[in-house]
Image (cartoon, rainbow, N blue to C red):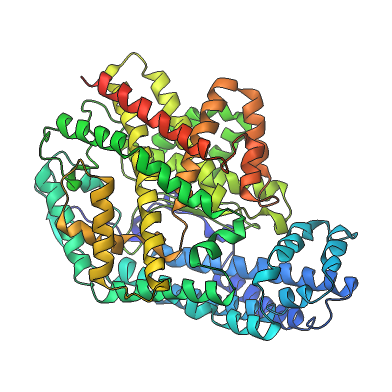
């Protein structure tokens, strides 16, 4: 029986070194005490922001506290992610979150007080000597004028922060720590415990009985929580609607798009464009069904099976990491050097262990290097996940080493661009290396097409689900397992009309943690579209495109997201950008079908 290891059984080299953030828990406690003291300092500037000298001191205090609180929470959460069963780090995480709310509450007076000043005051402050690092911050406050309440009201809203974060915390504890899945048989007949992180590996099995067992075990387990999870999600959605209404936004969607200055048309145009290209998606899926021997029986449980046999890349983690690094040589030796440093200095936590959070992410703080959490398996999909998460890490690295803290944090709208660009560059390089191997070409094109399916089509379907679930709440409709399952099943039937549906799949929305960060998932689709254009330009144009791309990586959050991408050479405000990516998808489907005939 294959057993998931305990964290203590992993080699030190194969764990991330969070000591680079805080040398010990005692160092974390010392920083926590300092942050607590700084909360009172920040609060002491209330009523004094009309004076430029006091405003400068208040902003210094605000960003100093923000920097500490960010580090404290990030460390605590990443320690918890190592093993969600550990009460010590659950407690640390709770304390950090409480501190975060206290800090937000202490500084909640700032925006309404600044907006109560004469309108020209913020413009004057933004151009004043000593305020260079605060210009973007002050201009963004000016944008928020129509959506800012009184100081007292903003303070009350800030005090609700911990309650607002509760659905995500509860859902995470339920699915990562408390929820247990059955044991199933793997391809060799061995009993293996199903987990969140090994589920997709089972769904890629060429034995349908293995896929069926994993699928049924996963969603039968989730259905046992058909009262609990919808209640958690409904609380999350209602919280989004509450915050949108109190900030005088017309809808939760508009409230979510406002910080990035993204027009609602970008969201709706994405969904409309995707609908037009669903026939090509289903041609791709039907072709896969034929290739795996299920021409008239292709079902949703068969979606993850690589349809082209005879090629895959199965490497131990270190070899896979070296291959990714080598494939990214178009981005330059300096880029590759940082990737090598990341592995040598333990920025990465590669392997699954009992209690570890599922999935993959890149995180860290301005004062540390980036970190990457993985749950690596020996296949091409996991290899591409390395490329993806290291793309995030490199984006943070370039931003943090170029921008001041106040401008380094970039929007989620652009976050998926660097990660997906890395993935596509790796695929392009592998296609070049295997250009004389027809099976390899077919398999690699399959990977790119499947990337479109998972990142553009699937995430847009998720975005449509989020739009509808929030609209339901705004219309006063109940969010129950029955109502949400109905919406999700309808979307699956629309997007995957060429594939047999599965009744249990109506509950899949219960398994998607991104839904607890509302209206985030559409950024995967827009990011993939932008990344496709950038990767193509880097391969074709060379140095000028690479220079523009690295400039984009280094700008952090110093500009609005759509303007940042214009620096890189892509205009996501133009529907033609998404259309261009989808037209490339259509072309690749034709090429894929020709290669596999």
- Vertical placement of 62 versus 211: above or below? below
Residue, x 18% and y 54% (percent of image)?
215
Q: Quadrant of residue 125?
A: bottom right
Q: Quadrant of the C terminus?
A: top left
- Vertical placement of 283 versus 141: above or below? above
82 sits to left or right of 485: right
- Vertical placement of 391 versus 505: above or below? above
65 sits to left or right of 484: right
Q: How many marks?
A: 0
Q: Nearer the viewer, residue 2 or 597?
A: 597
The location of residue 233, given as percent across then percent down, is 36, 71
Q: Quadrant of the N terminus?
A: bottom left
- Vertical placement of 196 versus 346: above or below? below
Q: Is any part of residue 510 visible from this angle?
A: yes
Q: Is any part of residue 357 visible from this angle?
A: no
Q: Nearer the viewer, residue 38 or 44?
A: 44
The location of residue 572, given as percent across then percent down, is 56, 42
The location of residue 109, given as percent across then percent down, is 71, 80
Residue, x 55% and y 59% (percent of image)?
257
Q: Nearer the viewer, residue 308 or 254?
A: 254
68 sits to left or right of 283: right
229 sits to left or right of 88: left
The location of residue 156, given as percent across then percent down, is 60, 85
- Residue farthest to the top, as pictured: 436
Q: Quadrant of residue 207?
A: top left
């Amino acid at each position: 029986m294959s057993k998931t290891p305990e964290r203590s059984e992993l080699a030190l080299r194969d764990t991330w070194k969070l000591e680079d953030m805080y040398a010990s828990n005692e160092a974390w406690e010392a920083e926590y005490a300092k942050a607590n003291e700084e909360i009172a300092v920040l609060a002491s500037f209330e009523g004094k922001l009309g004076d430029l000298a006091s405003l400068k001191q208040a902003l210094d205090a605000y960003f100093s506290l923000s920097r500490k609180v960010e580090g404290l929470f990030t460390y605590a959460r990443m320690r918890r992610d190592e093993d969600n069963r550990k009460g010590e780090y659950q407690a640390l995480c709770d304390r950090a979150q409480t501190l975060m709310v206290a800090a937000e509450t202490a500084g909640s007076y700032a925006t309404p007080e600044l907006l109560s000043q004469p309108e020209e005051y913020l413009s004057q402050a933004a151009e004043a000597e000593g305020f260079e690092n605060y210009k973007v911050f002050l201009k963004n406050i000016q944008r928020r004028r129509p959506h800012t309440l009184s100081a007292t009201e903003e303070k009350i809203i800030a005090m609700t922060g911990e309650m607002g974060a509760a659905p995500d915390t509860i859902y995470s504890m339920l699915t990562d720590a408390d929820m247990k899945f059955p044991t199933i048989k793997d391809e060799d007949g061995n009993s293996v415990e199903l987990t969140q992180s090994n589920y997709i590996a089972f769904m890629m099995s060429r034995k349908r009985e293995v896929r069926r067992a994993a699928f049924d075990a996963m969603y039968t387990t989730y259905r046992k929580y058909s009262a609990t999870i919808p209640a958690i999600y409904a609380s999350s959605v209602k919280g989004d609607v509450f915050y949108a209404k109190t900030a005088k936004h017309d809808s939760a969607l508009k409230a979510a798009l406002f910080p990035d200055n993204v027009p609602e048309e970008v969201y709706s145009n994405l969904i409309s464009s995707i609908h037009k290209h669903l026939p090509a998606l289903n041609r791709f899926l039907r072709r896969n069904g034929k290739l795996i021997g299920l021409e008239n029986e292709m079902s949703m449980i068969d979606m993850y099976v690589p349809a082209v046999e005879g090629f895959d890349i199965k490497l131990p983690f270190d070899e896979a990491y070296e291959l990714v690094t080598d494939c990214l040589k178009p981005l330059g030796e300096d880029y590759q050097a940082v990737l090598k440093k990341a592995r040598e200095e333990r920025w990465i936590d590669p392997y699954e262990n009992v209690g570890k959070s599922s999935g993959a992410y890149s995180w860290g703080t301005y004062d540390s290097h980036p970190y990457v959490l993985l749950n690596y398996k020996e296949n091409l999909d996991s290899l591409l996940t390395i490329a993806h998460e290291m793309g995030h890490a490199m984006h943070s690295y370039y931003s943090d080493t170029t921008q001041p803290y106040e401008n380094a944090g970039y929007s989620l709208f652009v976050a998926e661009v660097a990660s997906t660009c890395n993935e596509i560059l790796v695929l392009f390089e592998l296609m070049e290396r295997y250009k004389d191997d027809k099976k390899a070409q077919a398999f690699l094109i399959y990977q790119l097409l499947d990337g479109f399916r998972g990142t553009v089509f699937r995430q847009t379907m998720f975005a449509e689900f989020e739009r509808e679930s929030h609209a339901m709440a705004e219309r006063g409709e109940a969010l129950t397992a029955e109502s949400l399952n109905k919406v999700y099943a309808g979307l699956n039937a629309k997007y995957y009309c060429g594939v047999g549906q599965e009744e249990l799949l109506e509950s899949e929305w219960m398994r998607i943690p991104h839904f607890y960060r509302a209206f985030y998932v559409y950024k995967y689709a827009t990011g993939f579209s932008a990344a496709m254009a950038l990767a193509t330009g880097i391969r074709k144009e060379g140095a000028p495109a690479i220079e523009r791309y690295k400039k984009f990586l280094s700008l952090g959050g110093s500009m609005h997201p759509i303007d940042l991408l214009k620096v890189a050479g892509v205009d996501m405000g133009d529907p033609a950008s998404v259309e261009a990516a989808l037209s490339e998808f259509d072309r690749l489907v034709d090429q894929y079908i020709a290669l596999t005939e």
